Structures are given as structure tokens and as C-alpha cells.
Image: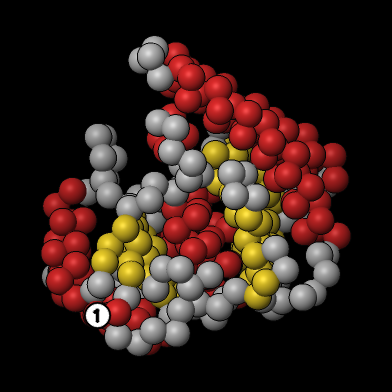
Amino acid sequence: MPSHSGLMTVIDRAARKAGPRLRRDFNEVQQLQVSRKGPADFVTIADQRAEQTLYEELSRARPDWGFLMEERGEVAGDPNKPRFIVDPLDGTTNFLHGIPHFAISIAVEEPMPNGKREITSAMVYQPITDEAFWAEKGRGAWVQEQRLRVSARRDLADSLIATGIPFLGHGNFAEWSRIFGAIAPEVAGIRRMGSAALDLAWVAAGRYDGYWESGLKAWDAAAGLLLVKEAGGFVTDFRGGEKMMERSEFLAANDGLQTRLHKLLAGALR
């Protein structure tokens, strides 16, 4: 296992400082289920508190870097320096309902010589299981000290695929239904667990064989994209291109399944 870089140590420390408070808040929110308004308000507070902790820790270590955060939006930094992309609580609805499946997601987006920006460091931290999925460009993907590899499966019939499902006020129900109708009959199962960051981390870990979702924000997917790539997988938009963030479309799998899933998906969208 490669040792953490200085930057990854900063990210790890920030996530592990915010994690225990989220665990405590999660245990409290389970006691608030009797009040319909209470849990929702409490989750918002928990989210904001976690984000504040992450912001304080990361900005203390890299004071001239900018941020893109779910709650406070863009925080300007030196445009020639990297910026942090942070989701303090991915899986808010799970958290609200007492389901222990949510994560902190932190990515670093770095300006490149060609004028583009690229994700170069990432961590998805699950506070309940204390699993830290992390990756740095060119150094592989890891969970704790174990190297991550995407699934080696080549047969869709043996494959477990993850997705996100549209819900009230979010997503294209007709499009999702067509894609589901094309993929579901071909695979061993489809799961909807409610955290895009963990879905992508689990593709990197080989727990899922593939994943598709649209309508995600940058903070939902940025860290997971690098995890999948550094674990040997591929991530494209629904057209097979690299405009995942611009189109807010994400299809992830190993090389063999990526091609098969893309054909099914493309056929459903014709």
C-alpha cells in the first residue's frame, strides 16, 4: 500500500473529524421519527455541522484553495490552485429515515496545463462502517489498506448493477424507466441504495459490477469517478463520451460490461 500523500492525510483527517459527529447525529435522528418536522430540520443541521467541520479542517490546511460544497455552494479561492468538491452527507434521505447507508465525499479538482480541470484526489468515507475509500491519480484506489479492483465479471447475467431512481421533483421518470426496462431483464439484479458516492465506491470495490444514474451534482459524483478509474474501471456519459459532469450522466463498470451496458442504454434512449 502506498502511504498517504500530505494532501490525502489532510482529507482523511477532515473526514474522520466530521464522521463521529455524523454518527452521533444519526443516532439522535432515529429518536426523532415521531415528529415529522423534527427529523428533516435536524438532518439539515447535521448536514451543515458536518460541512462546517470539513470546511474548517480543509481550509486550515489549504487556505488559498477554493471550494464547491453542497450547502454553501462555491467559495472562491486562487483560480490557479486546486479546489475541494465536498458533499458532507451523501444519502440524506437514508440518514433521515434511520438507514445506516450514507457517506462523506471529498474530491480535489486541479487545473491542468491544457486549461481543463481534473479530479486528482478523492475520498468517500462511510462513518457507520468506518470505511475510507480513497484514490489519488496514478496511485490506484484503496479501502483502508486494501487495493481496490473493479469486478472481473464479463457476463451481464451474473452482474449486479446499481442505480438511482427518480423521485418527487427530481429526475426523468420516462427515461429512467426505458433504461431500467432494457437492463433489468439482462442482469442478475439491480439495487438502489440511496448514495451515489457509495454506489461508485462499491463499483470500484467490485461489490457492484456496474452503475448508471443521471441528474447528479458534482459533489455527488466527483470522488467516486476517480475511485472507479483508479480501480481499473470506466466511467462515461450515456453517449459513451467523457462529458459526465456537463450532461450529469454517469455509466460506470469494467471494460467488458461498460460496452454491453452502454449498448443497452443507448438502445433504450433512441
Give percent across and percent down for residue 94: 42, 38
Q: Is residue 144 visible?
A: yes
Picture residue at 59% right of the left edge, 27% below the top: 25
Give percent across and percent down for residue 36: 36, 15
Q: Is residue 46 left or right of residue 16?
A: left
Which of the colour schemes (rainbow, by chain, secondary structure, one colour) is used? secondary structure
**Is residue 75 shown above or below 131?**
above
Give percent across and percent down for residue 247: 37, 59
Residue position marked by numbered label 1 in the rendering: 157
Quadrant where the image shows the N terminus: bottom right
**Is residue 196 shown above or below 67?**
below
Quadrant where the image shows the C terminus: bottom left
Picture residue at 79% right of the left edge, 39% below the top: 57
Q: Is residue 265 visible?
A: no
User: Of 7 and 191, which appears nearest the observer?
Assistant: 191
**Is residue 72 shown above or below 129?**
above
Q: Quadrant of residue 236?
A: bottom left
Count neighbours of disc 1 (C-alpha within 10 A) and say few if under 14, some if 14 to 19, many if 20 or more. Answer: few
User: Of 28 and 255, which appears nearest the observer?
Assistant: 28
Residue type of the residue flagged with mark 1: Ala
